[in-house]
Image (cartoon, rainbow, N blue to C red):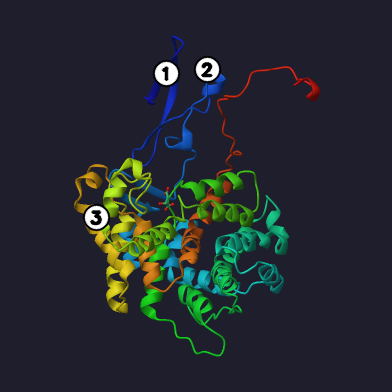
Amino acid sequence: MAKTAELILDGKSYKLPVVEGTEKEVAIDISNLLEETGAITLDFGYKNTGATKSAITFLDGDKGILRHRGYSIEDLAAKSSFLEVAYLLIFGELPMKDQLDKFSDDIKRHTMVHEDIKKILDGFPSSSHPMGVLASMFCAQTAFYPESLDPNRSAEGVYLSIVRSLAKMPTFAAWAYKNAMGHPVNYPDNSLNYTARFLKMLYALPAEQYEVDPVVADALDKLLILHADHEQNCSTSTVRIVGSSKASIYSSISAGINALWGPLHGGANQEVILMLEAIRKDGGDTEKWINKAKDKNSGFRLMGFGHRVYKNFDPRAKIIKKTADEVLSKLGVNDPVLDIALKLEEVALRDPYFIERKLYPNVDFYSGIIYRALGIPVDMFTVMFAMGRLPGWIAQWKELRENKEPIGRPRQIYTGQNLREYVPIDKR
Ligand code: MLT
């Protein structure tokens, strides 16, 4: 017999259907609640609201589990490549060799960006944050590929937009940085793989031979895998809600980039480094700052600790910490800010205050450290997150479209004035 939940409102009982996921997660289906009871549910920040059914990512915050299409993040990070994970997320299965080769070749064919988009880039002052530039260039594609605006596009048309999105993202990302530096841009070198191609566009200077360090390229590939999807987080929900109005893939993803920009979401790793810099400038006394974090009245919050959905260790943080250790020792990085980070982590991990509250370092804590060790500028951290999250956004946009989901339209409880009479200005 199908499970139901009982709701009693004003003494009247209502039976609500219960939905179970493949991992036995339970949801009470309230889609007909308003019609049947006249009431809506209220859930600030959607902390307890399932907005969709999705077959892409499974996350268990209590157990610290993250899986994409059934594969554990540990396996994917250790054994696959970013493009392989992108294929898995978007198309549902790990690719065969010929499928991955074709996917990678299709992407290479579209890495160049229309020179007129470059003119848009040239209009941005170098003081522009690269995230704003990235979101704008991403959205500008709607003007250059107007066929992408057709909400009833063919599967081939959608595939082309997916490939273009993945192909141009590293070019846009590197160009956004070059713009901030006031330097000329580099064009994509298609003899390199996805990550190395990005690094060369980011770092190479004109008239200089630039060799991509494979340690850096491999570490970056792993970081991109770790960020590839995270079910219905703020930016992904944004992509889905914008996409639900049948907006194009480029405008939906551009909205996701903007949502990711905030310091509470993708901007958190940048905030971690700014916090570490501030601690260093203050003399580097980590105990003092840990005590400040525990004092509610200090106004200081330890960035990069704790997570909205993980009540256990963030599984990505475990992998990234190991990668950070390996990369720091391979590159022989010696950086006082990184030393402070490691001390802070050590102190917090043995302090009962943090243990009781399950405030473990999250993925943003370590990603900031590792990006810094790789020489990636702080303003680019969130851009790196966007590059990693792109396959997830695409997969979720595609799923929403294929499932023909309705337009997203939450309700509200109105708390304003009741009806009152208009008073002319001279009588107020
Ligand atoms: C993410 O990866 O999107 C972040 O950890 C934020 C989240 O999941 O809410």
Seen in the picture, residue 413 relative to 351 is either above or below; the reply is above
- As measured in the structure, the alpha-carbon distance from the residue carrying label 2 to the one carrying label 1 is 10 Å
Q: Quadrant of the N terminus?
A: top left
Is residue 136 placed above or below 220 in the rendered structure?
A: above
Q: Position of residue 263 (x, y in %)?
A: 47, 52
For mark 1, what is the residue? 7
Mark linked to residue 37: 2
Q: If you read the primary sequence from the N terminus, does the residue marked by circle 2 or circle 3 appear first?
A: 2
The nearer-to-camera label among 1 and 3 is 3
Q: Earlier in the sequence, mark 2 or mark 1?
A: 1
Q: Quadrant of residue 299?
A: top left
Q: Residue at x 52, y 69 (%)?
A: 103
In this view, the residue in front, 211 or 15, is 211
Query: Residue drawn at (53%, 77%), measured in percent from left and top?
Result: 201
Estimate the x, y position of residue 292 in percent, counting from the top left: 30, 49
- Dot 3 amino acid type: Glu
Residue 91 in view in this figure: no
Name the residue rendered at 22%, 58% in the picture.
346
* Disc 1: CA contacts within 10 A as few (<14), some (14-19) or many (>=20): some
